[in-house]
Structure formats: C-alpha cells, structure tokens
Image (cartoon, rainbow, N blue to C red):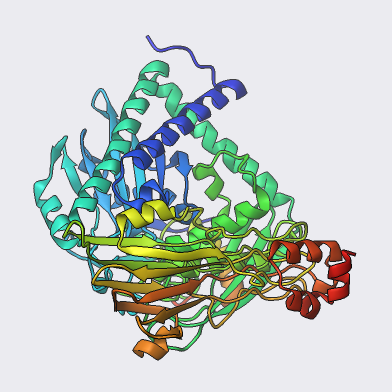
Amino acid sequence: MSTGEWIEMSYVWHETRVLNCPVCGRLILRKAWQFDGGDGLLRVCSESCEELYESYWKHAHGSMKGQ
Amino acid sequence: MPETLKLDSVGLHVLHNALANVAAEMALVMMKTAYSTIFNEGLDFSTVLLDREGNLIAEKNYTPSMMGAVPNTVRWALEELGEGFFEPGDVVVHNDPYRGNCHMPEHMMMKPIFRDGELVAFAGCIGHVAEIGGKAVGSFASDATDCYQEGLRLPPVKLFERGRYNEQVWRIVLANHRTPRNTWGDFHAMIGALNVGERRMAALFDRYGRDVIREGSARLIEYSERRLRAEIAELPDGEYSAEMWVEDDGVSTDPFQVKVAVVIRGDEVIADFTGSSRQVKGPMNAVYVVAASAVYNAVFCVTDPMTLIPRNSGCYRPIRIIAPPGTVVNCEHPAPSVGGNTDLQPKLIDLLLEALAPAAPDMVAASTGGSSSNLLFGGIHPETGQFFSNYHYDGMGTGATLSKDGNDAETTRHSNCRNTPIEVFEQRYPLLTINHGLVPDSGGPGRHRGGLATYRTLKVTSDEVTFSALFDRCKIRPHGLADGMDGMGSEILVRRAGESTFRRFDEAFGVASPTKFTNVVLYRGDELYYRTAGGGGYGPPAERDPRLVLADVRDGCVSRDAALRDYGVSADQLEGGT
C-alpha cells in the first residue's frame, strides 16, 4: 500500500534545465510523487514508479538514499 | 446528429482504421510537400494522433526511432505547459532532447484540435529537420561537446498562435538555420500535415460524436495493452542480460560500455540499463526517449513483429524502462546527443535482442550494420549561388536470424528510411556519384549469412563542399550470434584530386576518429568513398548449405577466397556446381 503523495515542484518559466526521475530516468515536470523509500524520502515521476522501486529496483540495486 | 457507431469489435476496427488512415494521409501530405530530400525521399518522419491527455491513439510510423518520443513528447509538453496553454489554431514546436525529443534535429510539432471550444485531441508530426544551425553543416557535429554546438534548441513554443504566425519565433528560427528556405518549406509541410489531421479528426468527431471517439480511443488503447501483455506472457519469466562496447564518442578514442538486464515477469518487461557508462563527452549519448525507442523496438520485434497489434499508448504500458540519468542511455543537459539517436540506438536494439535470445531464439537476429552512416555536407551551390545542405544515409546489412539470411542494403533497424535516388541527389547537390553497390564478403558468415553492406564514391563538382560524418561499427564490428561470425565494419576514405590512393580521414586530416569528423572541406575533384557495415551471421558457417554458398559466389555476394576460408567450400566444388 503506497504511503506517498503528489507534491508540486517549483516551476520557473525561464529555467532551462529539467529534472529526471532517479528511479526510471523519465522527466519530472510540475509535480513529483514522494514516498519513503526505506532510506529517506524519494521524489519520483509517478506512483507506478514507486511500485517499480519496491518490486524491482530495491532488490536489484539496494535502497536508494533519500534526496 | 452523429451516426451511430457501436463500439463492439467491428466498430472498434472501423474506428482504428479511420484513425490510422488520418495519420497515413497526414504522412502523405508531409512526403508530397516537404522541400528537403530527408522528408520527401528519406521519409525520416512520423505522423500521430493523440487524445486530449496526450495518449497516442494512431500513428503512421515511418521511423521507429521516434517510438519513444511519440508517447512522451506531447504528454510532457502538456504537463509542463498545462492544457490552458493551447488554443484553437495553435501550432507548438519543440526539439528539446531533454524534454522528450530524440535529438536536436528531430522536431515535434503538435496542434490541438477543438470542437465547440473543447480540446478533444492533438495532431502531431515529428521529423528530422536537415539543417538547424550549430557548429557543423547539417547540424551533425561528431565532435560536439555540448548541445549548444548541435543547433538551435527550442523548448515548446508556438509557431502559430490562434491561427496567426508567431513571427518572433519564426524570425529566430530562420535566422539560426543555414538553409532557411528549406526550413520554411519543411515546417510548412509539417504544419500542412497537422492541418489535414485536424480537419479529418474534426470530421470524425462530428460524424460519430465526441463521446464515441473518446470512449472508442480508450478501448483501443486497452485492447492494445491487453494484446501486448498476452504476447509478453508467452515469453519465459527470467532475467536476461547482455553488455557491449561502443568504439568511441567522436571526441575521445576511448570505448564506452552499455549494459542491460531485461526482466520478464508475467505480462510485463523491465529493461534496466543500470551499470552503463556515464555520459560521454562526444555526441554518442542517448536521451531517455532514445533508450525507450530501442526497448520498444526490441520488445515489439519478439512479440509482434508483423505489427498486428494497433500501435498506440496501450502497447507501451507493459514495458518499463530504467535509464539512469547521467549515463550514456539518458544523458543530462548539456551533453550532446545527435549520434545517440542515429548510432547508439540501433546498437541498443541489437543489445536488447542479444539479451532476449535465450527467451525468444527464433525471434532475434545477429547485429545489424548498427550505424546510420550519417554523411552531412553543404556549401554554396554553383548553379544557384545559394547555400545548400543535406543529410544523407545509405543502407547496410542486417543481422541473420535462425531462419534466414540478413537483408542487404537496408537502413538501420530503427530508421526504416530510404536513401535518396542518385538522379535526385545529383540534381540537388554538386556531387557526382562515381559508383554505388553492394560490398562482397561484408555479410558475417554463418549458417545464415549477414546482409551485405553498401559502398559509394562521391566526387566534388563545385569549388568546395564541407563534409561531416558520423559512422560507427568501424573498430568494433557487428557481431554474429550463435557461433555466427562478425559482419564487415564500416569505413570512410578520401582521395584528394591528383592523389592515387584513398586514405582514412584521421590520417589525412588528423581528426580523432576515423569515421567521425566535422567540417572537413573538400575541393573540386576530391573523392570521398564510404562503406557501411555488414550484418552479423547466425549459426556456424560450416553448417551453411554449400548450394547457398555457391549461389552467393555466383551472385557476387561472397568471393571464392571467402567461400573456402569461411565456409570450407572449395574451388572444385564451386566449379563443379556441387
């Protein structure tokens, strides 16, 4: 059961850089899914990325340090 | 009053065909009206239709390399800008590789479609614009070390605003491309395709009603997802891995590595590129959607090679990708990436298929030529006095499979593009084609032989032409599979006017890589020769039917020496015809 939540990211129209999801690599734009990854809070691109992290990523690569 | 369209299997089929035909008609408009040969001959573009949330509902996909961009680019632009940004008559363009495009030359244009003031869908067109400025003619700088050298980067901006030219944006774009007349024509071809898509979609919405189109599109997406999940579920669960080295990045001579673990669990696939090299200095980096395109391509190759499942967002849902940011499969700003799309992507597909070989041995192939053999050139045309520029590519060999030889002279697995016919080529550009053909012995020997590469020699017929090239598979050849042998590697050579022999570009001009160089000027009478790479062979060559070797020798595909050396078929056998 997910305990995460959507959080708004600060968006500045003149910022030219973008942010990528630390789990899957996709873009994170206006909002991020934040959850406790076991070693701190993680901000990822979507709720399903939490599921990917819990069901695969963590077992393959270990817990990701919170951001 | 809308017609009734019952959304049963027949009705959904009718709707799917209607949507697919709209996308196909958009593509025809694009092909028939574009100025540049890369579009009207090369077909380096795709046209798409999306629902109001940016989900892909139909496509005419000439270029599979764009598969990863299509489902993401519009959605991400929509998420970044918000639905309220889009108004009737708008056309939004963007080519930002860090925001979902494959590389800088790829421009995605999108047009919102409204009915009675409500946003109902998007029409989209993505294509490789042949000249977008930057340090190299043709915007393909093999030695670029950041994105600013690769051309003009556009975040999502409006080319048209409520049906009117956004002149400020056009002026910036045209002032930064070397061939603005072509950009003008090609952009308008893309916009023309969008306008046709808008009109046809509006007619569909009026004919069947908004609710039916919306519900039908959602059901088509669900259908495709269900079908693809069923195909994936047929594959044995497990983790399948492979790794490869890529010969250089155009700036350094050091190779770099890509690793992938493909996990099949039930009805979904995870492709995990963790462990791949950090992003490299030169332009061989892939962005996220390029890695995604490669994964989709490989998964579709083993699950639905005949494209029987309607290609829409549903096909992508069972496929999950892990492309760590900052690596060669998901580089971060400001890393250059033009060759990541053209030359890393085909090798990523090869790598993924190699990984999947144990799971689907009858559906995979040995390596392809694996390089788009990008040749760029430009200068002042002696007849027009105008600057010209062109992006040219030729076919290579594809990898052999368990059941057949590889194809000869085919563009890479991820592009499906066509080369430009010599008649058109010579009419447009001051280069004479001295010769062009298949390369004997370039297909990797095997029970099934790899496809043959091609060669071409060009002679400069104007005062000077500036060339850039980005070829790969020169030092690391396309590999064979299941004891098949490697295909022949690529090369690109130069012979200055008056010289008797051809030399490598690194020898002649001191560039870092023998096949990746930027802005080398050749003069009247100079000749440039190149050879693409052949495909890898499949299975031990000794197991090849000698009658097929004989046929290959007779056809000029395999030399007599190679027949003996690689296949053990002697001159006596060949002469006796046995």
Q: Nearer the viewer, residue B536 or B440?
A: B440
Residue B321 position within the rendered picture, expressed as x and y whole percent measured from the top left: 52, 62
Query: Residue B331 is drawn in which quadrant?
Result: bottom left
State the quadrant of the N terminus of chain B.
Answer: top left
**Residue B79's spot in the image, x, y percent?**
31, 50
Image quarter hosting the C terminus of chain B: bottom right
Name above or below for residue B54 compared with residue B404: above
* Res. B284 visible in picture: no
In this picture, is B62 found above or below B138?
Answer: above
Residue at 83% from the left image edge and 75% from the top image edge: B571
Residue B544: name its quadrant: bottom right
Most distant residue in the top direction? B1
Q: Residue at left 40%, top 78%?
A: B516
Q: How many labels sit on residues?
A: 0
List x then y, in percent, for residue B125. Answer: 35, 44
In percent of the image, x 47 and y 26: which residue is there?
A: B18
Nearest the viewer among B401 and B36 is B36
In the image, B243 versus B228, the foreground residue is: B243
Can residue B363 be seen from the camera position used here?
yes
Residue B435 versus residue B242: which sits nearer the camera?
B435
Residue in the picture at 58% in, 42% down: B225
- The spot of residue B111 in percent (x, y) is 28, 39
Residue B506, relative to residue B237: is it above or below?
A: below
Please give left or right for residue B278 compared with residue B295 in the image.
left
Q: Is residue B204 left or right of residue B300?
A: left
